[in-house]
Image (cartoon, helix red, strand yellow):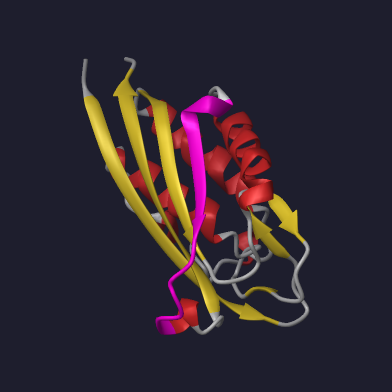
Amino acid sequence: MELKIGIGYDSHRFCENRKLVLGGVEIPFEKGLLGHSDGDALIHSIIDALLGAAHLGDIGKMFPDNSDEFKDADSTELLKRAYEAVSDKGYAVINIDSVVILEKPKIAALTDKMEKNIASALCIPAENVSVKGKTNEGMDFVGRGEGIAAISTVLLRREK
């Protein structure tokens, strides 16, 4: 059995007049994330981890931020498309572990819903997806409340 590990990272700055979406969940907050798509940094980091593990490049290669096709796109739909490409190479997801780094808002009450959304998009059990929220203890752009960062690892198994 062949196993592949991927790591993904994404960050976005906060901006006015946008919804805050993480893990496909709309989160009540006064600001959203600036991005070409919906700015879902969590899902973007998972996409990068998936693509990296399968040696398919990165999110910018698959979904260029200068393409009108992906303007304001739902990142959950992008995740499904990325996973389809990974599946076409013969891989299945074993598990995902993610950390969302942000000072505010607190996301602990919503991580179960995020895990279920991500698992549903990938057709895997929700217990195979872990999402955790952490602060950056007041350091750098995240600590100053200017944005969010997310880091994800993915373990794939070759099916074909």
Number of marks present in the image shown: 0
Residue drawn at x 77%, y 76% as measured from the top left: 30
Q: Quadrant of the C terminus?
A: top left
Please give left or right for residue 16 compared with residue 35 in the image: right
Q: Is residue 76 magenta?
A: no
Q: Nearer the viewer, residue 66 or 74?
A: 74
Q: Position of residue 94 (x, y in %)?
A: 39, 25
Residue drawn at x 68%, y 40% as measured from the top left: 113
Please give left or right for residue 136 compared with residue 120 in the image: left
Q: Position of residue 124 (x, y in %)?
A: 53, 24
The residue furthest front is: 137
With respect to residue 3, does 131 lie above or below? below
The magenta region covers: 126-140
Residue drawn at x 54%, y 31% as measured from the top left: 122
Q: Which of the 4 quarters of the picture holds residue 80? A: top right
Q: Nearer the viewer, residue 19 or 51?
A: 19
Please give left or right for residue 79 compared with residue 109 in the image: left
